[in-house]
Image: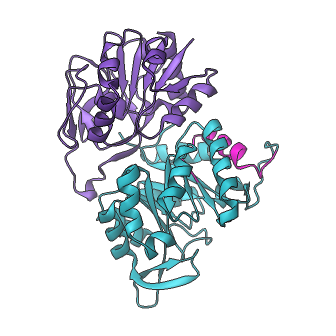
Chain colours: A cyan, B purple
Amino acid sequence: MLTKRIIPCLDIKDGRTVKGTNFINLRDAGDPVELGALYANEGADELVFLDITATVEKRKTLSELVNKIAHHVNIPFTVGGGISSVEDVYVLLNNGADKISVNTSAFKNPQLINNLAKEFGSQCVVLAIDSKKEDDKEWYVYLNGGRTKTSKKCFDWAKEAVDRGAGEILLTSMNHDGTKNGFAIEITKLLSQNLPVPIIASGGAGNMAHFVEVFEKASADAALAASIFHFKEIPIPGLKQYLATKNISVRL
Amino acid sequence: MKIAIIKYNAGNIRSVLYALERIGHTALVTDNAGEIINADKVIFPGVGEASTAMNYLKERKLDSLICSLTQPVLGICLGMQLMCKYSEENDTKCLGIFEETIKKFASQPPKEGLKVPQIGWNSIFDLKTNLFKNIPNNSYCYFVHGYYAGQGEHTIATTDYVQPYASALQKDNFFGVQFHPEKSASTGETILKNFLEL
């Protein structure tokens, strides 16, 4: 049967991984290519690379990096950060990325999703949403890496994006991100049980039980995390073994 | 060994080239008839939409060329689907190497967890032919597709999603896989090596 996916996320700036890692067996923990290949060998199901430089003059660095990753990594990977046009996506896919993710640019210009889906197919268009639950108990969409609030509700935007051709949703809960208290079950469940595309849950992973919870209770199709993998708080092989003992379908 | 990867207007072609490089082979990405005919092995990759791809192949006469090949040919994902008789995707007549027709997965309520397209790692079983030499039953491969080939006499691997379907096909020198061996970690690399040894 189709398995639940475990996805490490690497933040990239100027071609280097940003957050520190404690992989002592890596020659260069700042090298996204080496770290990505290591995760692939450990059993990660996919990788996400988010470029936080995302300035025009650095785009070339990113496309060169994507090309290196594509040469060395034998699992699918998504590239996001600063993508705002069909041309941007063409360059990344042509350099070997399997999927791209769009966030703020798609919100500001939703037609971009239609254009990307038409040009490249929905299967490579991931919509990333940063969402926060406000005092009124509603989940709202935030832009610009969580700095700008909008009045759009998360579910409404996700549904619109799927109707426009997004093939997957990468949902990050700002309330949970960095807390290590577990994923956002409620909003992840709302999306995954009502939208016809896979939902990748992100933000809040602190222990292995949190992954069981997001797969079982929230029906997430995939779970993404960064620091807990980078700092080896949760090793990927151990996590997948654990999920298997909890009867979660995983690729071992 | 001369390996040709058929160049056409589908995505993912570079990924196949890089995967071959990882297992120690170089390949030519080409739409030149002579280069394709003279290759020892031909790979027909692809991610995309069936009717657009078929039109492109026809315009360049690659359709009849592919059907006439006598060396081992491996279709991947859309490549495999185009080697079948017909695809429901935009009512497309395909190459007809395999008798199978390509159908769309019936849409399921999202609550069932069976989303369309299928995206992710699924297992392959009932493996036949040397393409799957040293591949244990129920190994995992990476799939991205909304259309599938039904099971038939050419089925050499089966996968279960919504219902059992053919995840690999073979007839004479033609092989097709629905999954992406170039993205399926070490399992995929073994399958590619096996193909090159056929």
Compare residues A56 and A136 and report the one nearer the observer. Answer: A56
- Residue drawn at x 54%, y 57% is A88
Residue most toward the bottom? A136
Above/below status of B17 relative to B40? below
Seen in the image, is A54 located left or right of residue A99? right
- Residue A228 figure quarter: bottom right
Q: Residue at x 54, y 42 (%)?
A: A241
Residue A10 picture location, percent across and down: 64, 56
On screen, residue B170 versus residue A170, left or right, reads left
Q: Does the rendering let one see residue B184?
A: no
Left or right of residue A101: residue B162: left
Where residue A249 appears, x then y in whole percent? 42, 44
In front here: A243 or A76? A76
The residue that appears at 41% across and 57% down in the rendered structure is A116
Magenta residues span A28-48
Q: Is residue A76 magenta?
A: no
In this rendering, is residue B180 above or below A23?
Answer: above
In the rendered image, which quarter contains the N terminus of chain B?
top right
**Residue nearer the viewer, B161 or B116:** B116
Q: Position of residue B156 (x, y in %)?
A: 32, 19
Answer with the quarter of the image where residue A226 lies: bottom right
Residue at 58% across, 65% down: A82
Asked whether residue B29 is in view, the answer is yes
Number of labels in the image equals: 0
Quick check: is A36 in the magenta stretch? yes
Q: Please determine whether, in this image, residue A46 is positioned above or below residue A129.
A: above
How far across and how far down the image is residue A52, in percent?
A: 65, 65
Quadrant in which residue B132 is drawn = top left
